[in-house]
Image: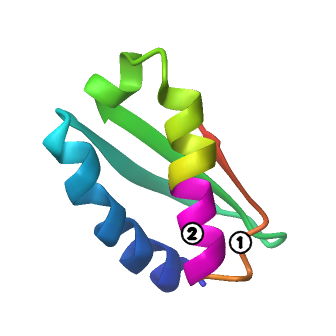
């Protein structure tokens, strides 16, 4: 599952980079919780939580159904 998540994150990355930010994969737990780190402009953006939940989490759940949640670290 880790490789599927990393591949899906590669599809999200250009959108974040266009706004001066990025996302880094940290880990995935056995229960499907994915930990990521938002960096650059995304790391300090007041909308980071919405980006994480409404953008990244929604996309990952669609692309990798085993994902249960995405959390920022």
Q: Is residue 32 above or below residue 26?
A: below
* Nearer to us in this view, 47 or 4: 47
| Quadrant assignment for the N terminus | bottom right
| Quadrant assignment for the C terminus | top right
- Whether residue 47 sits left or right of residue 61 in the image: it is left
Q: Is residue 45 above or below residue 19?
A: above
Q: Quadrant of residue 39?
A: top left
Residue 60 inside the magenta-drawn segment: yes
Which residue bears the numbered disc 2? 60
Residue 36 shows in this picture: yes
The location of residue 64, given as percent across then percent down, is 61, 82
Q: Residue at x 41, y 37 (%)?
A: 38
Q: Residue at x 61, y 57 (%)?
A: 57
Q: Main secondary structure of the magenta part?
A: helix
Residue 64 inside the magenta-drawn segment: no
Residue 73 shows in this picture: no
The location of residue 65, given as percent across then percent down, is 71, 83
Lower position in the chain sequence, tag 2 or tag 1: 2
Task: State how far apart marks 2 and 1 are (Cα).
Answer: 7 Å
The location of residue 7, given as percent across then percent down, is 38, 79
The location of residue 70, given as percent across then percent down, is 66, 52
Q: Residue at x 55, y 81 (%)?
A: 63
Q: Are marks 2 and 1 in contact (CB under 8 Å)?
A: yes
Point out the stretch of residues depicted in magenta: 56-63
- Whether residue 40 sits left or right of residue 12 in the image: it is left
Which residue bears the numbered disc 1? 67
Q: Quadrant of residue 43?
A: top left
Query: Disc 2 on helix, strand or loop?
Result: helix
Query: Disc 1 on helix, strand or loop?
Result: loop
Q: Residues within 10 Å of mark 1 (few under 14, many from 20)?
A: many
Q: Is residue 29 above or below residue 63?
A: above
């Amino acid at each position: 599952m880790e490789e599927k998540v990393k591949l899906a994150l590669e599809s999200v990355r250009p959108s974040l980079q266009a706004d001066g930010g990025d996302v880094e994969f940290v880990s995935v737990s056995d229960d499907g919780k994915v930990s990521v780190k938002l960096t650059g402009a995304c790391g300090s953006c007041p909308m980071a939580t919405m980006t994480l939940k409404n953008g990244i989490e929604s996309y990952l759940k669609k692309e990798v159904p085993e994902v249960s949640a995405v959390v920022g670290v």
